[in-house]
Image (tube, rainbow, N blue to C red):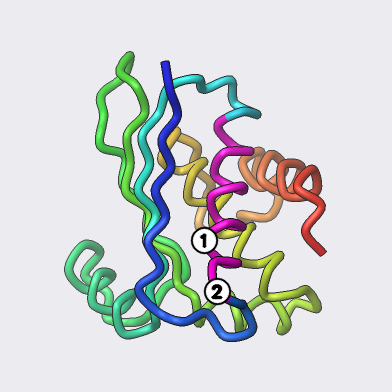
Amino acid sequence: MSVRVEVNQECQVPGFGPGEAERLVEAAARAVLADQGIGSADLSITILDDGGMASLNREWKGRGDATDVLAFALYEGGEQPVGDVYLGAERAVEQGPAAGESAARELARLAIHATLHVLGWDHPEEDRESSEMWAVQERILTSLGVS
């Protein structure tokens, strides 16, 4: 059994030094897998700019705007979790400070959120912050200690 988390940074994340965003995102995804008791998984996580996220959102969701997270579970029940995750760097950099938090904390939150989606968690579109998924996400985020 093994956990593989591969992070690809396709754009510069404003405010992050070389390798910082990748290390943060990998740590966040691994924290989710550990929290959920997953000992074997294969995740590919790509950090994209708004243009890349808008293009994928249009292709896969039929929406033309940049989004913060796209997550695709690529396995059937009973199989090892496998998934592709796309994170919007520019969305994290805007959303974090807009909510009074750092871009790093928001990027970690997005990685946690997407990884939970790959594992089958979901939330209602309305009032997502009161969902069980949100509570789990915030608990894991707090455990990472990202300020």
Occupied quadrant, residue 34: top right
How much space separates mark 2 and mark 1, taking CA atoms? 9 Å
- Please state if 74 lies on the left or on the right of 71 as rendered: left
- Please state if 126 lies on the left or on the right of 71 as rendered: right
Question: Which region shows up in magenta?
Answer: 18-33
Tag in front: 2 or 1: 2
Helix, strand or loop at mark 1? helix
Task: Say if the magenta span includes residue 29.
Answer: yes
Q: Residue at x 33, y 14 (%)?
A: 78
What's under tag 1, amino acid-wise? Glu
What's under tag 2, amino acid-wise? Pro
Q: Which residue is drawn at 41% across and 40% down?
A: 118
Q: Residue at x 39, y 48 (%)?
A: 6
Q: Residue at x 42, y 73 (%)?
A: 67
Numbered badge on residue 22? 1
Residue 143: x, y in percent? Answer: 79, 43
- Check disc 2 and report the residue beneath it: 18
